[in-house]
Amino acid sequence: MLVANSYDRQISDAARVLAEGGVVAFPTDTVYGLGADIHNTSAVERIYTIKGRPKGSPLPVLISDISRIGDVVSNPEPFAIHLASLSWPGGLTLVLPTRLALPDALLQDGFVGVRVPDDPICLRLIERFGGPITGTSANRTGNPPAVDAGQVRKQLGSSVDYILDAGRSQLAKPSTVVRVAGTEITILREGVVSPDAIMRTWDEFRAARSGV
């Protein structure tokens, strides 16, 4: 298992690049991600250019701990908090309604995607930077996600300002994406976390709330 302390210099350098408005590629528990300061509009827009990603396809956000969900989501749904407490850190992205003033590139119809990754180096990077960062996959749109630094270099080359090379991603598979809107639970993308497990959790949550 990789230990974050072994990569302290790289983490510091990557955090500095983020603070200066750059774009960083970094490992997560699923695949390598592309990170930028979510409040730096020009940096976020660069990610669309780097990936060749169409506008209107929002970028997910990574936070360091469930306690930081309020940085991006206002009044999260009770089930969202319950599901996050069971699944984070881990391969589940929750798409939740928010009323916070976030960049348009992160939002779709008032919803934002957020996740706490289960990777010590990634978490250290977010903490060192001091705030949420984008967490979209480090690849050209339409190509397979990169699962190591070599694949990032092959696909994205010098368009990325810094690559934090920490070997192969643990799972090499994207996160599951779930939209939670009141009592409506929608699986938007299958990935690491089983959709069946999510829906079982939802059924158990509803039963507990109703006293059944």
Image (cartoon, rainbow, N blue to C red):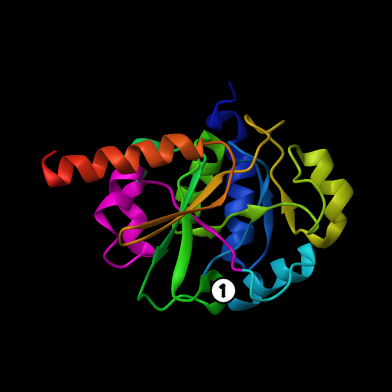
Indicate whether 45 appears above or below 115.
below
Please tell me whether residue 129 belongs to the stretch shown in magenta.
no
Q: In front: 203, or 166?
A: 203
Indicate whether 179 appears above or below 52.
above
Tell me which residue sits at (53%, 67%) in the image: 38
Residue 44 placement (x, y as % from top left) = 63, 70
Side of 49 relative to 86 (left or right):
right
Tell me which residue sits at (37%, 70%) in the image: 98
Side of 114 relative to 204 (left or right):
right
Residue closest to the far top: 1
Please tell me whether residue 74 belongs to the stretch shown in magenta.
yes
Q: What amino acid is at disc 1?
A: Asn
Tell me which residue sits at (43%, 47%) in the image: 64
Residue 12 placement (x, y as % from top left) = 58, 47
Q: Residues within 10 Å of mark 1 (few under 14, many from 20)?
A: some
- Quadrant in which the N terminus is drawn: top right
Looking at the rendering, the stretch of residues picked out in magenta corresponds to: 58-83
Residue 64 appears anywhere in the view: yes
Q: In front: 32, or 210?
A: 210
Q: Secondary structure at mark 1?
A: loop
Number of numbered discs on residues: 1
Side of 38 relative to 24 (left or right):
left
Residue bearing mark 1:
40
